[in-house]
Amino acid sequence: MGRIVAAVGVPHTPVFPRLAAEPAGADLRARYSAVADLLAAARPDVLCVFHCDHINAFFLDNWPTFAVVAAETVRCPVDEVPRVPQTDVAVHTGLSVRLYEHAVRREFDPSLVMRAGADHGLAVPLHFLDPRHRLPVVPLHINGMVAPFPSARRCLALGRVVAEAVADWAADVRVAVVASGSFSLEVGGPRVPPGAGYAVPRADWAARVVQLLRAGDLESLVREATPPLLADAGTVAGELLSWIATAGAVDGLTLARLDHREGEAHAFAAWTR
């Protein structure tokens, strides 16, 4: 049967690949590498990546709340990410279809995407975690960009449904789950200072998320991650929903690393057996 052998969470800031390649980026490289090493040690066969599109692969005329990519490949990034060339990444279509069918049976209604692209929300984690694209992926989109978002509790349930689907699958496959995104981040909004690319409106909320993840207190996390709070935390603070879905899938795993620094919008995390 299938097994979830690890889970990780990382930010997907588009400039991080360029910054990490510069001499001054040694610390950033080390933070991603620490997570990537724990992921590699788990020897996964496939990466299921919870991420949020930023109106690049999808548009408002057809905007899914949840989507599962089951194409043979996914082209990413479809936006510009310095030092990350566009490529076609193999998709584990068997697992994608399995997750889609199980989700429908469990009364979720994800879109099934058969011709797919993905933006930096998928491309940046893969750049650091699997730069040679050795592993097939299952891209799992959660809307954290265009209100109304799915509830935090619904996303936690989705993660548990993914874990069920993997455990019930007859195929002998080792699965790792990836959370992509930040907790409090303003991009393109009124709280970004002149000349800056982003702001962190609620650093206190980001620290609170880290506290609750470290304690394994998912009940408090889903209760506190309300739509008004996410709106106050920034224009793309809904990316937290990908982390919550991942947290729902990690039952039986141990939090091996949680790297967050005061004032940051994000964290670097790993759960292992």
Image: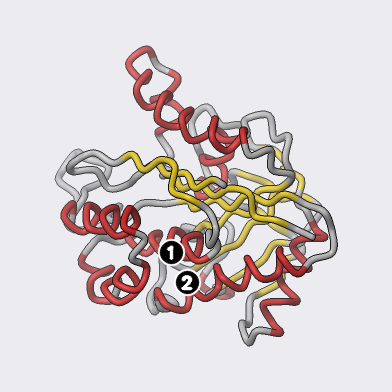
Q: Give the labeled residue for mark 2.
A: 156
Q: Position of residue 81 (x, y in %)?
A: 50, 36
Q: Is residue 109 above or below residue 44?
A: below
User: In the structure shown, which secondary structural element does the residue marked by tag 2 occupy?
Assistant: helix
Q: Give the labeled residue for mark 1.
A: 244
How is the rendered protein coloured?
secondary structure
> Pointer 1: residues within 10 angstroms few (<14), some, or many (20+)?
many
User: How many numbered circles are shown?
Assistant: 2
The disc labelled 2 sits on which kind of residue? Leu
> Pointer 2: residues within 10 angstroms few (<14), some, or many (20+)?
many
Toward which corner of the image does residue 89 lie, by quadrant?
top right
140 or 247: nearer the eye? 247
Q: Residue furthest top?
A: 23
Residue 186 visible in the shown view: no
Residue 98 visible in the shown view: yes
Toward which corner of the image does residue 244 lie, by quadrant?
bottom left
User: In the structure shown, which secondary structural element does the residue marked by tag 1 occupy?
Assistant: helix
Q: Position of residue 122 (x, y in %)?
A: 56, 48
In the rendered image, the quadrant that contains the N terminus is: bottom right
The disc labelled 1 sits on which kind of residue? Ile
